[in-house]
Image: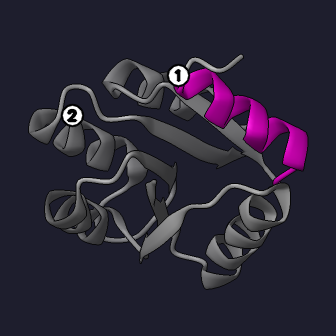
Amino acid sequence: MKVLLVDDAEFARMTLKRLLDDYGFNFQYAEASNGVEAVRMYRKILPDLVIMDINMPEMNGITAVSEIIKIDKEAKIVMCSSIGYQQKVDDAIAAGALDFIVKPYQKETVVTAIEKVFGLS
């Protein structure tokens, strides 16, 4: 499965990748550091899953979700946010995201969100 990790912090992408690998997911990863790159990469690779931060430069995650949904109404997108951004999370869900993960990442929360998106839970 192809997964697009989108976050302006390289450390956050690396942490998430390590968490997913340690859990045993056998994903192929692509990465983007902002919403503009995320939309471009989505068109290019058509990933099975997108895990995207909300707050990023150039194009935020909420706008990127809307753009990706225009490309693929069935896109599977999980948003990430820090504690205290509930309204932005609600906006992302309204734009088409299927679930959200609160930072800092915790293995159980990440795995549960992925399982929910793929109907495994």
Query: Disc 1 versus disc 2: distance between alpha carbons?
Result: 16 Å
Residue at 44 percent of width and 46 percent of height: 49
Check contact, mark 1 vs mark 2: CB within 8 A.
Answer: no
Residue 81 vertical position relative to residue 27 in the rendered view, above or below: above
| Residue under numbered circle 1 | 90
Q: Is residue 83 something one can see in this rendering?
A: no
Quarter that holds the C terminus: top right
- Image x and y of residue 98, in percent: 48, 25
| Residue under numbered circle 2 | 69
Residue at 62 percent of width and 72 percent of height: 13
Crowd band around label 2 with a 10 angstrom C-alpha radius: few (<14), some (14–19), many (20+): some
Task: State which tag comes first along the sequence, 1 or 2.
Answer: 2
In terms of secondary structure, where does tag 1 sit?
helix
Assign the magenta stretch its main secondary structure.
Answer: helix
Q: Which image quarter: residue 39?
A: bottom left
- The amino acid type, in three-letter code, at marker 2 is Ile
- The amino acid type, in three-letter code, at marker 1 is Asp
Quarter that holds the N terminus: bottom left
Find the magenta span and give its range.
104-118
Q: For this rendering, which residue is in front, 66 or 18?
A: 18
Q: Is residue 112 magenta?
A: yes
Viewed as shown, does residue 19 lie left or right of 45? right
Outermost residue, bottom side: 10
